[in-house]
Image (spheres, rainbow, N blue to C red):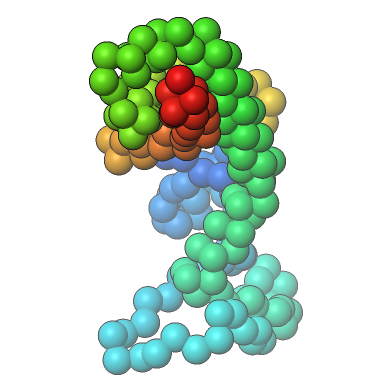
């Protein structure tokens, strides 16, 4: 990598590449000795200090006076702990992805209403089939159990089919949309527990959406059977 230094253009070897979200243009990190060798700049804009295990962290950040600088003039120094920086970063990320959480809730609501409508229509179409099952001896509780089991199986199949599509959509968001819209990306971390949560969510949503149609069908057939 070639950089323009105070000594002229110079080629530097790249030791590694890391993700940095503090600057949209990216940063170059090198040792202080290398920087002073090629640039005539002795000022200090940041420093890091490690505390011992016996010291307690006080306030998240404080201000102090310092005489470091090119002109040796007193300058204000802001001291922040790693915990404060981490909390501030997480707060910014939470605000950034607040819209994503709202969209997720809307998607869950739309999916729930869609499954409920489909099951209600299916219940009307299967009235004769379930009536025949009642005629051969199925109780209303057994009818409710059969319909609920079928609904849970539908949710399980839908969740299994949605997992690869969700991973593909996440890859498109991370590597295409984020890079084109914001100029940065992040590692794609696909965890098994997250996939399992999505699968369980699909099954639970299907079961909840199928409770009312199953209960309604069982009650209507029970009333019809009693009347007959």
Q: Number of marks in the image?
A: 0
The residue at 36%/10% (across/down) is 132
Considering only vertical position in the picture, is 78 above or below 151?
A: below
Can residue 125 be spotted in the picture? yes
Residue 92 is situated, as x and y percent measured from the top left of the image, at: 64, 54
Considering only vertical position in the picture, is 95 above or below 150?
A: below
Which quadrant of the structure image shows residue 194? top left
The answer to whether 182 appears left or right of 83 in the picture is right
Considering only vertical position in the picture, is 206 above or below 69?
A: above
The residue at 57%/30% (across/down) is 112
Can residue 1 be spotted in the picture? no
The answer to whether 56 appears left or right of 125 in the picture is left
Q: Nearer the viewer, residue 10 or 211?
A: 211
The residue at 56%/45% (across/down) is 21
Q: Nearer the viewer, residue 6 or 113?
A: 113
The residue at 49%/25% (across/down) is 227
Residue 96 is situated, as x and y percent measured from the top left of the image, at: 66, 46
Residue 210 is situated, as x and y percent measured from the top left of the image, at: 47, 29
């Amino acid at each position: 990598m070639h950089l323009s230094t105070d000594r002229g253009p110079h080629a530097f070897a790249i030791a590694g590449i890391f993700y940095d979200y503090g600057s949209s243009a990216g940063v170059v990190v090198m040792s202080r000795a290398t920087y002073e060798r090629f640039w005539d700049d002795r000022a200090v804009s940041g420093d890091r200090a490690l505390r011992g295990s016996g010291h307690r962290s006080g306030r998240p950040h404080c201000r102090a006076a310092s005489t470091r600088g090119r002109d040796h003039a007193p300058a204000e120094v802001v001291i922040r702990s790693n915990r404060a920086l981490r909390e501030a970063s997480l707060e910014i990320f939470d605000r950034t992805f607040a819209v994503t959480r709202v969209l997720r809730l809307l998607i869950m609501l739309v999916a729930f209403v869609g499954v409920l409508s489909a099951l209600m229509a299916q219940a009307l179409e299967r009235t004769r089939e379930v009536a025949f099952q009642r005629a051969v001896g199925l109780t209303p509780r057994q009818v409710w159990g059969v319909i609920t089991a079928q609904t849970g199986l539908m949710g399980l199949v839908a969740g299994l089919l949605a997992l690869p599509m969700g991973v593909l959509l996440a890859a498109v968001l991370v590597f295409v949309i984020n890079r084109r819209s914001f100029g940065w990306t992040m590692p794609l971390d696909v965890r098994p527990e997250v996939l399992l949560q999505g699968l369980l969510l699909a099954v639970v949503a299907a079961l909840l959406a199928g409770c009312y149609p199953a209960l309604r069908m069982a009650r209507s057939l029970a009333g019809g059977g009693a009347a007959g």
